[in-house]
Image (cartoon, rainbow, N blue to C red):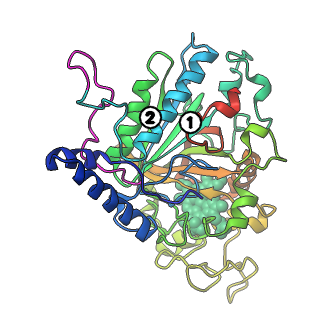
Amino acid sequence: MPEPSPSDLSRRGLLGLAAAGGVGAVAGLAAGAAAVSAADGGGGSASARRYDFYGRHQAGITTPAQDRLHFAAFDMSADASRDDLAALLADWTEAAARMTQGLEVGESGAVGGSPYAPPEDTGEALGLPASGLTLTFGFGPTLFETADGVDRFGIADRRPPALEPLPRFTGDALVPEKSGGDLCVQACADDPQVAVHAIRNLSRIAFGRASLRWSQLGFGRTSSTSTSQTTPRNLFGFKDGTANIKAEEPDAVAEHVWVSADDGPGWLAGGSYLVARRIRMIIESWDRVQLAEQEDLVGRTKGEGGPMSGGGEFTELDLTATTPDGAPAIADDAHVRLAHPDVNGGIRLLRRGYNFVDGNDELGRLDAGLFFLSFQRDPARFVAVQRSLARDGLNEYLRHVGSAVFAVPPGVQAGASIGDGLLG
Ligand SMILES: C=CC1=C(C)c2cc3[nH]c(cc4nc(cc5[nH]c(cc1n2)c(C)c5CCC(=O)O)C(CCC(=O)O)=C4C)c(C)c3C=C
Ligand SMILES: [Fe+2]
């Protein structure tokens, strides 16, 4: 897992330097930032947090889930060449390495360039620190081969066999405009303005080579990826992420999250697969359900989040436990039973989703839900769990409207591009 680390001057540092008017102030500022990051291991002041962009794995997977998300899927332009793709990924890498350290895009940034040229950075993050920003890149099936079988970039033979569009699941109500994509960027941060700034600038950099297909804002993480984090709640009001894979379980991370060299292809070793599902939650109906039924549908208590088989939040589920009248304590159609590794051949997913509210529909119902994100070693593992959830009692209150899958390459070292492994 990439550790939070001190780095260059932040956008705030640069402004601070200008205000202090001296090089001596630079050293003081940089040292101060380093002390914050190093002393608290990244768990202190949220806005001072910084994660290395470079490393064995991309950040934004096992790093502690931040509270804000801007997720974007892009399509390559119809006339883009392989060189355009390589150049885009190199430009994105360079910009991401700077923004995740709290720096502006480009040397001249938002206000340091020619007054007669558009600025290199759009400027809305000026004065804001890194805010724990992570940028995680992925490649969709259509990057390798279009739905019509066209190999636009000469990489069809590099496509991981496991990277196929997800199958249709029972109850899917997918909207094509909110699904798929050639490329994706997951921007997570402690500050929504920093996440949005990152996607906006990557989108601007892509101009003429790729364009936004769809994007999703998220607030309120719906999972924990570290034991140092408290368990958040989803919009049904339940703790979510209790049994998630945590970074402090290195064996589980290795077994369930990272693609190994044996899994193939070689360029993806140390990477993962990302599944995104935009799940609308019919919260107006849910809010009329009795508490006891809500708890039966989830399989956990609403207050503490303990299993209906008894115990506290982190007590293991007892799927064999029965109530005094002989019924299963955790109902047969309870979400946690059907998602549990014991009924899915041992499969675990690293969940990293977010709550969303995107206004309301014409009936006055909130367009709200859970933007489900999971990282796994093989997308077939997500497919198996999602198929098991076909009997989930929660489905009456859920509608899957968006869907996408991406191969997430491993991290890169300084000087390399996120596309190097794929494009050679
Ligand atoms: C296919 C994978 C999953 C989808 C889609 C999904 C949607 C979804 N989940 C909740 C609420 C909760 N999920 C919880 C646990 C849980 N969910 C999944 C998988 C998917 N969920 C797994 C693998 C697990 C862990 C099961 C286990 O090992 O016990 C919980 C309980 C708390 C927790 O452990 O995280 C809640 C609550 C919603 C509302 C939702 C769709 C909107
Ligand atoms: Fe779940």
Judging depth in this view, the residue of 41 and 346 nearest the camera is 41
Q: Look at 29% across and 45% down and name the residue there.
A: 11
Is residue 85 placed above or below 81 in the rendered structure?
below
Tell me which corner region of the image, top left, top right, bottom left or bottom right, holds residue 413: top right
Q: Nearer the viewer, mark 2 or mark 1?
A: 1
Per the image, the residue denoted by label 1 is 415
Tell me which corner region of the image, top left, top right, bottom left or bottom right, holds residue 37: bottom left
Residue 147: percent from the left, percent from the top?
70, 21
> Which quadrant of the rendered structure holds the C terminus?
top right
Q: Residues within 10 Å of mark 2 (few under 14, many from 20)?
A: many
Q: Is mark 1 within 8 Å of ligand 1?
A: no
Which element type, helix, strand or loop, lies under badge 1?
Answer: loop
Q: Amino acid at mark 2?
A: Ala
Tell which quarter ligand 2 is in: bottom right
Relative horizontal placement of residue 133, taking residue 191 as reference (left or right): right
Q: Which mark is residue 95?
A: 2
Is residue 243 placed above or below 383 in the rendered structure?
below
What's the magenta bit mostly, secondary-structure-wise? Answer: loop
Q: Is residue 278 visible?
A: yes
Q: Look at 23% across and 30% down and name the residue there.
A: 111
Q: Look at 24% across and 46% down and name the residue there.
A: 127
Q: What is the span of residues highlighted in magenta in the rendered image?
A: 113-132
Residue most extreme to the front:
24
Q: Amino acid at mark 1?
A: Gly
Q: Residues within 10 Å of mark 1 (few under 14, many from 20)?
A: few
Query: Magenta segment: does it hold 121?
Result: yes
